[in-house]
Image (cartoon, helix red, strand yellow):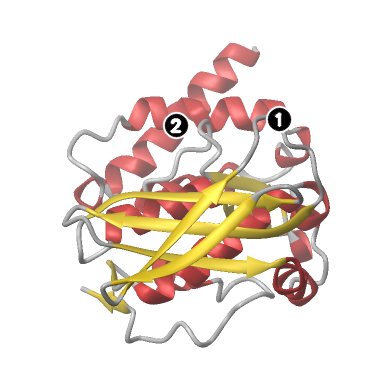
Amino acid sequence: TQNKQELTMSGYFTSELERIAGALPEDFNKQRFALGFISMIQDHPELQKYPKEELATAVVRAAQDNLDVLNGEVYIHEGRNGKIGYDISYKGMRKMAIERSVKPVDNIIAKLIKEGDTVDEEIVNGKAHIHYKSKFGNNGAIIGVMAICTFKDGSEIYEIMTKEEIDACKAKSRNSGAWRDFYGEQAKKSVIRRLCKQITLKFTDKRQADDFVGANEFNFDASMSSNTLILF
C-alpha cells in the first residue's frame, strides 16, 4: 500500500513539474526530483499531514529555483500559521548566486572564523585581498564568518561578519528554529547574502528574488536593492 501511495504521489509531482517544463533546465530530471521529495517527506512525518497540492507547490518552487532537497539546498518544513515552510540553505544560496550572477563566477566559499584562526586583509595595487588560515579540527568558539567569491576573470570579492553582526541577524529572525539548531549554517547564509550585495544577480521572477534576499524571512535586509537584482 505504501509503495502504491508513493507511486501515486510521484506521478502527481512529476505531472506538476511537466507543467513548468519550459522553465526548468534542459537536463532537469523531473522523476528523480519528485522521488527526492517523497524520500524527504517520508523522513519528516510532520509534513505528511499536508495535502498533496500544497506539497506539490513546494516541489514546483524548489524546481524553479533549481534547488535539491537531497543535497540540503532547501529545507521544506512545518512553517508558521499551518503553512509549509520553505527555507533556502547556505548551500542553496551559494548555488543560486553562482548560477544567477551576471558576471561569471568561478566559486563562492563560506567559512566560520573560530578562536585560533587568522584572517588578514591587505590591499595590493588598489585591490583588496583576504588571507584565511585555520588549523584542522579547530573546535574553538565562533567569532565570525567570511565568504569569498572568485570570478572567472580572476578577480575576487569578499565579506566578513563579526559574531555581533551574526547575532544581530539571528535576533531579526526572532531566534527561529533554524538559528537554534543550525547556527553555523545560518551564519554562512547571512554572510553569503551580504556578499551578494556586491554581485549583480538576475532572476526570472520577483518571487525568486524575494526568496534570495530574504523578503519572506524576518531577517530581510532592504539594503539589497534593485541595483543588484535584475528581473528578466
Where does residue 37 sit, x and y in percent of width and height?
A: 53, 33
Q: Nearer the viewer, residue 6 or 177?
A: 177
Tag 1 residue? 137
Q: Name the residue under label 2.
A: 34
Name which residue lies at 43% across and 45% down.
Answer: 67
The reply to whether residue 89 is visible in this rendering is no
Q: Residue at x 67, y 48 (%)?
A: 117
Classify mark 1: helix, strand or loop: loop
Q: In this view, does 227 lie above or below 182?
A: below
Placement of 39 over or under 4, stated as above or below = below
Residue type at mark 1: give it. Answer: Gly
Q: Residue at x 70, y 27 (%)?
A: 43
Residue 180 located left or right of residue 62 = right
Q: Nearer the viewer, residue 207 or 164?
A: 164
Of residues 31 and 194, the one drawn nearer to the viewer in this rendering: 194
Q: Please state the horizontal and vertical placement of residue 85, each as a whole percent of the image.
A: 66, 56
